[in-house]
Amino acid sequence: MRDIRIASRVAGIDLSGIRKLFDAGGPDAINLGIGQPDFDTPDHIKEAAVRAIREGHTGYTPNAGIPELRNAIVEKLRRENDLSFGPEQILVTAGGSEALHLVMQALVEPGDRVLVPDPGFVSYAPLARIASGRVEGVPCDETLHIDVERAKEMMDGARLFVLNSPSNPTGMVESEESIRAIVEYAMDASVTVVSDEVYEHLVYDRPHFNAARYGDDVITINAASKTYAMTGWRIGFLAADERYVNQCLKVHQYCQACATSIAQYAAVAAYSGDQSAVAVMREEYRARRDLLYDGLISLGYEFPKPEGAFYMFVPLGQDRIEEAIGKGVLVVPGASFGENAMGYARMSYAASRETLRAAVERLATIG
């Protein structure tokens, strides 16, 4: 067979350990590894998609997104986040992941330092490396929040600082003081902040604060995926200075063309329509968080209670992680999230209460 050649920036990257969990485990496995809502998309959003199909909205759209959706996002940012953007500052993408990819491709030069949370979302470091950036992990403190002083020490000379609150995988929500301190230091150091806020509505004990409120060189990334249980619809966006949007649009135009037309019309209904389902889902996640956290504490594990998203970052220890997976409780080992997370496991409580109780019962039999 003929040898093939692969670009080193791609060949050196592993496939996500999380994606493997979609097909992992036997018929009785309890999968706490997938970061995906188990709720159905609200009916009024699905009905908007059906209506779009019936009305023939099935062709290409403007590269940046349909005007109705960009305007709906502008209004969402004003109403919910007290942020002022124009539609020309919005780029609709195929999920938040594409938005992250576009930013890395448009802003990172070979060798540029890209600071990412460690532990942090599995896509940050690989996307930076695909863009030929030099990744450096910013540690968290003993409460699993960003170590702000360490972050500032690392900031000088960096190109990007990726901020994620609420956090995947830790479930922590950064305080207003921390976000302000990071953004203001970044502005002084000429570092662009990329703020991933896809879990903004899933907060339980403290409010979410938008990074763009504290500096003008901030790129906000968000998506309909988690807020409206629309992971498979693949609708995200970035909101930024129009000059950044225009450069990201070039990459988007040639690799994606546009987000799916039908999903865009559904997202208009999501952002502009009835929001009551968001609160219902959030309160159910809160109850599930409490159930799983109390169960793990009762087994002797000690760790900070998550404040947002739908994840727990639990110090199981490597042997217990392997034993848990062997017992059919599928969790994501901390090594998937960076170098500072060895011995931890991410557990998703986007699962039924019955499933979570069963997981705690199995975990009681290990170690």
Image (tube, rainbow, N blue to C red):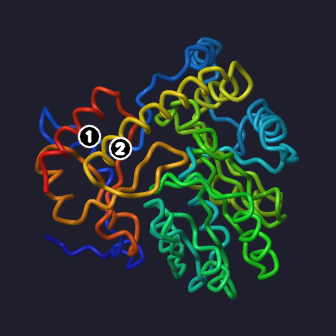
Give the distance between the C-alpha atoms of the residues marked 2 and 1, in whole angstroms.
7 Å
Which label belongs to residue 83?
none
| Picture residue at 62% right of the left edge, 13% below the top | 51
Residue 190, position in %: x, y?
Answer: 78, 79
| Picture residue at 63% right of the left edge, 75% below the top | 108
- Above or below: residue 238 compared with residue 186: above
**In the image: residue 48, left or right of residue 243:** left
Q: Residues within 10 Å of mark 1 (few under 14, many from 20)?
A: many
Whether residues under marks 2 and 1 lie with C-beta atoms below 8 angstroms apart, the answer is: yes
Which label belongs to residue 34?
2
In terms of image quadrants, where is residue 23?
A: top left
Which of the pair 68/166 is nearer the observer? 166
**In the image: residue 321, left or right of residue 184:** left
Which residue is the site of mark 1? 31
| Picture residue at 59% right of the left edge, 58% below the top | 164
Q: Amino acid at mark 2?
A: Ile
Residue 67, position in %: x, y?
Answer: 79, 34
Which of the pair 171/246 is nearer the observer? 171
Q: Amino acid at mark 1?
A: Asn
Residue 79, position in %: x, y?
Answer: 82, 35
Q: Quadrant of the C terminus?
A: bottom left
Which of the pair 312/193 is nearer the observer? 312
Residue 28, position in %: x, y?
Answer: 13, 33
